[in-house]
């Protein structure tokens, strides 16, 4: 038994790391791989080992309406016998059963399917409160979590369900490999409370005629935006909680194929949409690699949610060279660019940007307008935009002001040491510093302590009378103020 798809090197590495964690005694493993890295392929390879040993696998989808989609994905990966457990069906003799946590909870008193390995797909949706209702039954099973963003919707970490986190390659590394496409980000120069631009105008300016996911604040906002796109002659549709399942599937398929046929098949005469305005429904589990534009027309409080949304357009496809992220509230100023290096954790803060990323202020490229954090430098020293490759800043010119160079450190001459002592003594006298401060500075400069008494003598020779009383009074006032 084997999957149809060969493993990529980074996938093989993360699978080996997860097996090492299992051999080390870990039974709750969370694998983190960016959207488009092939999480399902990684999960399938892990569970194939259990199936070869005669084990049973339970693959969980977080919503019951996603069970058929999960089954189809597993079958595309080469596993033929996949059964679905839902409210209308029971267990079968399949190698892998697909179910939702809601179904398991509902069946807790009726009998649960056996499983030596349980896969929690999109693991960030699960919480210990729900899981504990079936946890005792599966206490001896291995839990394998799969997610691109190990951060719940409220920003909480996932240490209550998993005891080891295994990261895959980063977004930036996958872009360099060609697995994901480069992403150009447009945003206001600072984070804003309101939308910085009309989404329709932003689409026309930056991604005209491209397939675009627009993420909206609520249903009313989505419907209003779709009408605005249609008024400008841009085919658009909505997908949200009130959209029937057949219409949702037809609109999504028409969007993917850019064909009216899926819509005609269910009896509607809508045009295939170029733009899909949605509310929380297309943030994950949607695979349309041809889409290249993501418009964030809503607030976003956590990096995990933002990465799920922009991840819809980072997948590579034939003829696709890049993606565009239009962030109309400037969330990237707080959460970082999609390709920023991030550190994920099971405890405390689930997601932090690397120190280098945190210290880098995002600025728009003067050539293409895209937001840039870490600039590149070419062989001639020019600062180069990583998106458009234009040179945007000349190499810094080093100015020279001729001055005498003197020896410092342990090889400095006695004359140089005396000049340094006299110069720093003036500083000490003006600031009412004690001779000990001057001795410490001398030792830092030359690697040895000054001659005994020389610091006090140097301060006296400045002719400046240190006002220690004034210094003490100032210190007392400062302490009282705090």
Image: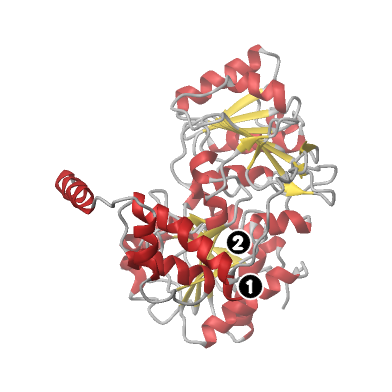
Q: What percent of the width, then of the height, locates residue 209?
A: 76, 26
Q: Does residue 160 show up?
A: no
Q: Residue furthest left?
A: 480
Q: Are marks 2 and 1 in contact (CB under 8 Å)?
A: yes
Determine the secondary structure under disc 2: loop
How crowded pointer 2 is (Cα within 10 Å; few <14, some 14-19, many 20+) is rated as many
Residue 243: give x, y in percent of width and height: 52, 32
Up-down relation of residue 82 to residue 476 (above or below): below
Q: Is residue 215 above or below residue 63?
A: above
Q: Residue at x 59, y 15 (%)?
A: 228
| Residue 268 position by quadrant | top right
Q: Earlier in the sequence, mark 2 or mark 1?
A: 1
257 to the left or right of 164: right
Relative height, residue 70 to residue 262 (above, below): below
Work out whether residue 160 or residue 432 is closer to the camera in this orientation and state it: 432
Kindly identify which residue carries mark 2. 33
Left or right: 367, with 236 as reference point: right
Q: Which residue is under mark 1?
A: 14
| Residue depicted at x 46% and y 22% | 220
Name which residue lies at 64% across and 84% down. Answer: 52
Crowd band around label 1 with a 10 angstrom C-alpha radius: few (<14), some (14–19), many (20+): many
SS of the residue under disc 1: helix
What residue is at 46 percent from the left and 24 percent from the top? 194
Q: Residue 208 at x, y = what percent?
A: 74, 24
Quarter of the image where one finds residue 218: top left
- Where residue 35 appears, as percent x and y from the top left, is 62, 53
Calculate the distance from the C-alpha at mark 2 to the C-alpha at mark 1.
9 Å
Q: Along the line of sight, which residue is nearer the eye, 471 or 422?
A: 422
Nearest the eye: 253 or 332: 332
In the displayed structure, does residue 34 sit left or right of residue 183? left
According to the image, what is the colour scheme of the structure? secondary structure
Q: How many marks?
A: 2
């Amino acid at each position: 038994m084997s999957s149809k798809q060969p493993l990529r090197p980074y996938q093989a590495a993360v699978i080996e790391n997860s097996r090492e964690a299992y051999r080390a005694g870990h039974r709750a493993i969370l694998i983190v791989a960016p959207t488009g890295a092939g999480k399902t392929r990684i999960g399938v390879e892990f569970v194939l080992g259990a199936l070869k040993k005669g084990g049973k696998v339970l693959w969980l989808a977080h919503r019951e309406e996603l069970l058929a989609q999960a089954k189809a994905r597993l079958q595309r990966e080469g596993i033929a016998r996949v059964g679905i457990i839902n409210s209308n069906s029971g267990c079968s003799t399949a190698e892998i059963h697909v179910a939702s946590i809601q179904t398991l909870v509902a069946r807790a008193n009726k009998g649960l399917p056996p499983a030596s390995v349980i896969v929690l797909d999109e693991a960030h949706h699960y919480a210990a409160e729900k899981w504990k209702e079936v946890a005792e039954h599966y206490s001896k099973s291995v839990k394998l979590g799969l997610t691109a963003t190990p951060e719940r919707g409220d920003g909480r970490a996932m240490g209550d369900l998993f005891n080891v986190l295994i990261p895959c390659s980063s977004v930036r590394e996958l872009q360099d490999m060609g697995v994901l496409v480069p992403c150009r980000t447009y945003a206001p120069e600072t984070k804003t409370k309101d939308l910085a631009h009309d989404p329709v105008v932003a689409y026309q300016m930056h991604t005209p005629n491209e397939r675009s996911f627009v993420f909206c604040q609520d249903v009313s906002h989505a419907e209003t935006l779709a009408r605005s796109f249609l008024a400008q002659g841009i085919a658009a549709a909505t997908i949200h909680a009130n959209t029937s399942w057949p219409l949702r599937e037809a609109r999504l398929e028409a969007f993917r194929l850019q064909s009216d046929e899926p819509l005609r098949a269910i009896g509607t005469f809508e045009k295939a949409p170029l733009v899909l305005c949605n509310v929380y429904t297309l943030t994950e589990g949607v695979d349309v690699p041809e889409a290249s534009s993501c418009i964030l027309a809503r607030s976003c409080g956590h990096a995990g949610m933002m990465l799920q949304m922009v991840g819809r357009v980072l997948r590579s496809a034939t003829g696709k060279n890049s993606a565009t992220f239009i962030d109309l509230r400037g969330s990237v100023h707080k959460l970082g660019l999609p390709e920023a290096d991030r550190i994920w954790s099971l405890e405390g803060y689930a997601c932090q940007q690397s120190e280098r990323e945190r210290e880098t202020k995002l600025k728009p490229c003067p050539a293409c307008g895209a937001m840039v954090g870490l600039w590149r430098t070419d062989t001639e020293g020019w600062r180069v935009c990583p998106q458009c490759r234009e040179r945007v800043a000349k190499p810094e010119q080093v100015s020279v002001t001729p001055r005498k160079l003197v020896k410092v450190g342990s090889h400095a001459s006695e004359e140089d040491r005396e000049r340094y002592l006299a110069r720093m003594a003036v500083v000490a006298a003006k600031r009412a510093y004690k001779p000990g401060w001057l001795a410490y500075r001398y030792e830092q400069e030359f690697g040895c302590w000054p001659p005994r008494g020389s610091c006090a003598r140097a301060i006296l020779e400045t002719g400046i009378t240190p006002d220690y009383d004034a210094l003490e009074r100032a210190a007392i006032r400062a302490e009282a103020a705090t």
